[in-house]
Image: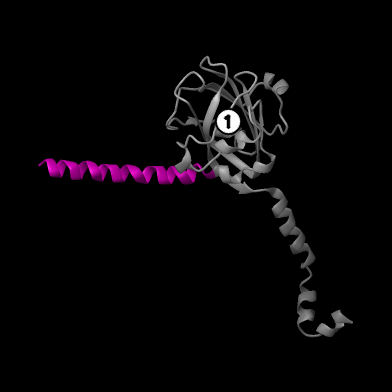
Amino acid sequence: MSGHGHGHSHGCGCEGEHEPAERGLEYGLYQRIDLEKLQCLNESRDGDGKQVFKPWDRRNERDKFVESDADEELLFNIPFTGSVKLKGIIISGEDDDSHPAEIRLYKNIPQMSFDDTGKEPEQAFRLNRDPAAELEYPTKISRFSNVNHLSIHISKNFGAESTRVYYIGLRGEYSEAHRHEVTICNYEAAANPADHKVESIIPQTNFIS
């Protein structure tokens, strides 16, 4: 009987493993970030802010993180390579007072600075400590349906002098940037006159001479 019980619990475990794989696909927006242009203001070490945007299956790794410098605030300026419909966000930190306690989201304000954080955000969240990266905060999709640039302002933590973040997950949908569509239109315009195509099949020498 105990053997059967063990087998059953193992079966449940396997079913549970399928769910993160699907969520991993949903949390694939990190691949659509223009990392070269991503900024993290008030990071204690240059470049660390880029490292917290990583694959779903690496969300619990602790070797890469960003820590705030002068105070507890961090400001991420995140440009995407196209247009994003943001549906949810996960922020994971240490299981102590350095974990972010509040975030404010802004859209389409490139090069945002701390001086700009007085503006009304598109949405703000009070966070719970989430060292396992399990808590998703759903966004108001109507406000985040056409996002080319996302700013995440971590305005406070739970009382520590500095803030530490291990993982930021962004869930949503992605569409190509408009400039690609313009390029396609240009190609179509160049090849538009159908009679030229027909002529080029037969008297090709005319074009060479």
Look at 40% across and 42% down and name the residue there.
20
Amino acid type of the residue that numbered disc 1 sits on in the rendered structure: Val
Q: Is residue 115 above or below residue 152?
A: above
Quadrant housing residue 74: top right
Q: Is residue 164 magenta?
A: no
Quadrant housing residue 13: top left
Q: Is residue 182 above or below residue 41?
A: below
* Total labels drawn: 1
Mark 1 surroundings within 10 Å by alpha-carbon count, few (fewer than 14), some (14 through 19), many (20 or more): many
Give the magenta range: 1-28
Judged by its main secondary structure, the magenta piece is helix
Look at 64% across and 42% down and name the residue there.
35
**Residue located farthest toward the top when viewing the structure as drawn:** 159
Look at 52% across and 44% down and name the residue there.
28
Q: Is residue 23 magenta?
A: yes
In this view, the residue in front, 179 or 18, is 18
Q: Position of residue 143 (x, y in %)?
A: 60, 32
Q: Which residue is mark 1?
A: 66
Q: Is residue 45 above or below residue 55?
A: above
Look at 47% across and 38% down and name the residue there.
59
Placement of the N terminus among the 4 image quadrants: top left
Q: Position of residue 88 (x, y in %)?
A: 51, 34
In this view, the residue in front, 48 or 178, is 48
